[in-house]
Amino acid sequence: MHNRFDQFRRSALGQQLEQLIDTPQRYLEYAALSRAGIPAVTAIVHDLQHKFTEVAADQSARQFCGAMVGDVMRRHGHQLLRPRGRVPGGYFSYGAVWSPLPQARSFAELLASLAAMPQQVLQRLATLPPARQRARPAGTAFSALEHLCHLRDLDDDAFRPRVRAILEQPQPLLHGVNGSEWAIARDYQAQDYAQAASGMVRARGELLALLQGCDAEAQARVGVWEGRQRLTLAELVADMVAHDDTHLQEIDELLLALDGCAV
C-alpha cells in the first residue's frame, strides 16, 4: 500500500479497518464480486454501516479502505480493470473493479509494464496547466510534481539499489522508504516540473537496463524484506508494477479532484 497511509494504518481506526479488510474470507468475497464486475470494496459496506459509522464522514478512512482492498487484490494477482465502478450501498460512490481471476504475468510482461509507466504518467498529466502542477486538493496524496519526483527518486534510490543488492549479495536485507518524508525533506514542491518529468523517464530507463539482462537464475535470487519476508527478484519486480499501478490510480484521482469531482 502507498506509504501515505502509514500514519493512518498505525491509528486505532486504521488497525481495526485492516482487521476487517485483510482476511482470507474477505478476499473470497472480493473475488466473487470481481467475477460479477462489481467493485470489490462493496464487500465491506455492510460492516462499515453497522460497525464503523464514523467512516461515513472520514474521507481519509474511506480512501484507506479502498487502498487496502486494492492491496489485497494486487497481492492475489488481480489486475485493475476500471478505476471507477459504481458501489451500491453507500459510503463509496465509486470503487475499483478488478479482473475476475488472478492473472499471472511473466517476467517479460512485468518489464513491459514497467517500461510503459512513464508515458502513461505523462499522458495523464499532459493537459495539466502549469498553475495546477503543484496543486494538492484535500483528500489527495501528492501533487502532480510530487508524483514525478517520487517516481524518479524511488527508481534511483530504492528500486535500483534493491535490484543490485539481490543480484550481488546472498539474501540481502531490503528496506522500505517513506515517500511522504522524502517529499518534505527533498522539497519536491520547489523542484522544476520539466526536470522532474525527464528525470522520471531517465530513472526508469536505467532500472529497466539493469533488469533486462536478468535470466531465470537471476530472477529466482532472494532478498529479505525488512527482515521478515523472503521474496525473489521476480516477486520484487511484481511489487514495483503494483506500486506503479497505485500511482496511476492516485494520479487519476488527483485529476478528478482538480476538475472538481469527488474522489
Image (cartoon, rainbow, N blue to C red):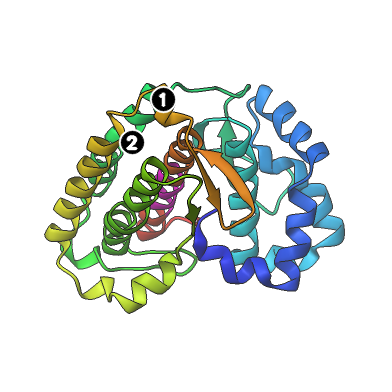
Side of 216 relative to 14 (left or right): left
Q: Nearer the viewer, mark 2 or mark 1?
A: 1
Q: At 17% across and 54% down in the image, what residue appears?
A: 199
Depth check: 222 or 39 in front? 222
Q: Is residue 170 magenta?
A: no
Residue shown at the point (31%, 64%) measured from the top left: 146
Label 2 neighbourhood size at 10 Å, few (<14), some (14-19), many (20+)? Answer: many
**Quarter of image, res 5:** bottom right
Q: Which residues are magenta?
A: 244-253
Q: Is residue 23 left or right of residue 194?
A: right
Q: Depth check: give the residue in front, 184 or 89.
A: 184
SS at circle 2:
helix
**Viewer can see residue 191:** yes
Total count of labels: 2
The x and y percentages for residue 177 are 45, 63
Under mark 1, the amino acid is: Phe
Residue hosting label 1: 107
Q: Is residue 172 left or right of residue 159?
A: right
From this view, report whether residue 126 is shown above or below residue 8: above
Q: Is residue 216 above or below residue 222?
A: above
Three-letter amino acid code at the position of disc 2:
Leu
Q: Local crowd at mark 1 within 10 Å, few (<14), some, or many (≥20)?
A: many
Q: Secondary structure at mark 1?
A: helix
| Residue at far right of view | 50
